[in-house]
Each structure stands twice: as structure tokens, then as C-alpha cells.
Amino acid sequence: MSIARFWRETPRRYNLGGSRCTEYGTVYFPPRPVCPACTRHRRSIEKMVAFQLSGSGEVLSYTIVHEAAEGFEMQVPYVVALVKTDEGPVLTGQVVDVEPDAVRIGLRVHATFRKLREEGAAGVIHYGYKFAPDDDRGIGGPPGERGPVPTPGGKAGQAKA
Ligand SMILES: [Zn+2]
């Protein structure tokens, strides 16, 4: 992804801002300008409102990655999970602050903002959401108070479930 595109998308990456159809209550993330269900049923497309995801959800499935992608060399093994948010949308993200062996389907997690990777000699640092177990300490917070947390060294305990 280009840097320009990344920064254009950054506000919603930080905020987990999606959209919600007021006709059926379906939540979309990333936000959609129209609701596919309503469009299919010829309803109004003027029913979408901005919707803030809480970032909380549970692990739907996960993979332990042992072969690092470029830019992730220092982090293997790491866990990438599909997280079903409480509001409905399924997000993909790395699970942090937990031993890979302790991740399981159904684990309660919440989004937290972390350094994703550094890019090239310029040292451009990308931030985005990752997921941490709910029973850790000192990470996360109520919706609306989450911001960048550039402290990857802050290990918040072993979340054995
Ligand atoms: Zn709809």
C-alpha cells in the first residue's frame, strides 16, 4: 500500500469507524456508502449513518504464522486472527500480548493501536489496530478514548485462558 493511500485511510483505521444501515441495523466495516441488502430490495440508499465500532469481539479463527512477511521479521511466531466484533463485522488482525499457544477460538479480545511496521530507510512507521485479550491489564479503554499506543515493549501479562 502506498504511503499516500495509507494516510488517507488512517482516520478510520484509528477509529474503527464503520457505517450502519438504519433500515436493518447491519454494521459495515470498512464503512459502505450504501447498504447492499437495501439496494437489493430497492429501498432508500440514504439510510447509512456513521457507526463507531467498540473494537471488542471474539476470535473466530486464527493462524500462527512462523514465516515472517517482509517487515515482520522480528515478531515470529505471531498470530493472525479473524475477529468477529460485537457489532457484527469480521476484522482481520494480529493478536498481541498473549502467547500464540494460548490463543483459541472464542477468546475475547479488543482492538488496541500498535505499530504495524516500519517502511524502508525513511523509517516511516505505520500504526493500526491489533487485538489483545480482554483479561490483560493497562491496555485499551472505553470507545472514543483509544489513540495510538506506540509502546510495543509494554507487555501486559500472560493471558492464559
Ligand atoms: Zn440496509
Image (tube, rainbow, N blue to C red):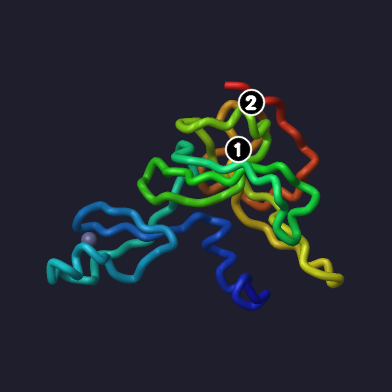
Ligand 1's quadrant is: bottom left
Question: Residue at the spot x=25%, y=66% of the render?
Answer: 36
Q: Residue at x 33, y 62 (%)?
A: 49
Residue 8 % position (x, y): 58, 73
Q: Residue furthest front?
A: 67
Query: In the rendering, at what x and y percent does residue 55 appear?
Result: 49, 45
Return the residue nearer the eye: 115 or 95.
95
Number of dots carrying numbers: 2
- Other-residue count near label 1 (Cα within 10 Å), few / some / many at <14 / 14–19 / ≥20: many
Q: Can you identify the residue that label 2 sits on?
A: 159
Q: Is residue 141 left or right of residue 124?
A: left
| Alpha-carbon span between mark 2 and mark 1 | 9 Å
Please name the amino acid that badge 1 sits on: Ala
Q: Earlier in the sequence, mark 2 or mark 1?
A: 1
- Residue at the top extreme of this rendering: 161
Residue 72 found in image quarter: bottom right
Does residue 110 appear left or right of residue 32 in this picture?
right
Of the numbered discs in the image, which one, if any, rests on residue 132?
A: 1
Q: Is residue 52 above or below residue 39?
A: above
Q: Nearer the viewer, residue 65 or 137?
A: 65
Q: Nearer the viewer, residue 110 or 119?
A: 119
| Along the viewing direction, whichever of 11 and 62 lies nearer the viewer | 62
Residue 151: image quadrant is top right
Residue type at mark 2? Ala
Mark 2 surroundings within 10 Å by alpha-carbon count, few (fewer than 14), some (14 through 19), many (20 or more) = some
* Image quadrant occupied by the C terminus: top right
Q: Secondary structure at mark 2?
A: loop
